[in-house]
Image (cartoon, grey):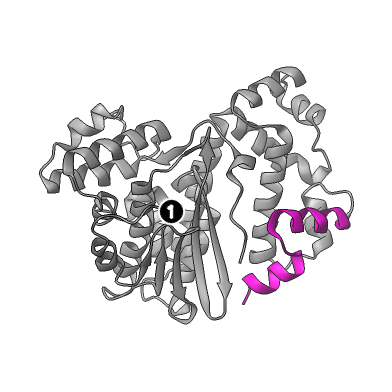
Amino acid sequence: MSKPHNSAEHMTLTSTVIGGWSVAVGRALDAIGCDGDALLHEAGVDLEERFNCEARFNADHTRRLWQLALAETKQEDIGLQVARFVCPTTFHALGFSLWASNSLSEALKRMVRFEVLLNDGCHLHLDSEQGLLHFSMDVKQSEGKDLVAAEGVDYFLGAVVKMFRDMSAPSFAPIKATLTRARPDNPTCWDDFFNCPVEFSAQRNQLVFDRTTLHETLPTGNTSLAEQNDKLVEAYLHKMQLNDICGQVRSCLIELMPLGITTMDGVSQALSIPPRTLQYKLSQQGTTLQELRDNIREELARQYLQHSRQPFTQIAYSLGFSDPAHFNRAFKRWTGETPTAYRRRTSE
């Protein structure tokens, strides 16, 4: 299994979540008997924007809303209750890509691939081990605080299970769920929702599935429809990245790395931003060019190794490494395993 990301090494000042989340929260609060719009407004959510399919809300607003919802409802499982109101449009075009996936394992791979669309305050991982698939949600931190609240983790993992029940069978359930949150006063709410053993105060937020079950062909599978919606997701992410300096640098690095250009001078020249100015802007976002470059290389390396049969040498050069040996050492530093071992394990 892959190692959890060290949050201190991937620090950001804020994060954002897809706007469809706020619609599900509002509907859940209304169903409970609360004024969903009032709580959303109090949390700082722009009510006019929440039905905008491309809107995003930052971590401060989402954490505040979970706090308000918890205080108003007095229900610890509020995240799970919101998950019951998730539908395909909650996740933009990705929701339809998931529904059109040929299997639940394929849907999970799409979530990992497009994790930034869902919530860029966490990293998603899918690992295979002894007939099981482990789907993990590692929350990033900023200044010692989680960018995703415990209720937000409940909501997201609950949404995954809810969608999978809609896509396959109402009785679908993980084998096990683990959560880093402290044990609640009434843990049976979690047991009942996930319909499996739930461990609290765990090391990772994770759903464990039977691999055979997740590989079964779904009647809703449609490869062409899934790929068309994947393109819409990619277009959304491209637009999203261009709206911030980190996104601009990421896009620039992705274009320049196959050419072997990964330095500050090369990136600043391509963006027409003086090196010192670019360095300062990145520091204001709590990151550096090297950190962004390493993150991109790791993300792309994982994708290439898992979803393509490209030779290691070709992958190394496409990521801007001058020597495949440097790529091998870097990948082992990131993941704790060699590219060969990673490809073998994730392709099982």
The image quadrant of residue 168 is bottom left
**Residue 6, how many percent across, how many down?**
61, 47
Direction from residue 3 to residue 66 in the image, left or right: left
Instruction: Identify which residue is drawn at 70% across, 22% down.
Output: 278
Q: Position of residue 117 (x, y in %)?
A: 47, 46
Q: Residue furthest left?
A: 33
Residue at which label 1 appears: 94
> Which image quarter is the C terminus in?
bottom right
Disc 1 residue crowd, few under 14, some 14–19, many 20+, Cα 10 Å? many
Query: Closer to the camera, 307 or 302?
Result: 302
Above or below — where is 308 with respect to 56? below
Q: Position of residue 67 (x, y in %)?
A: 29, 37
- The residues colored magenta run 324-348
Q: Is residue 340 magenta?
A: yes
Whether residue 273 is situated above or below residue 10 in the rendered picture:
above
Q: Amino acid at mark 1?
A: Leu
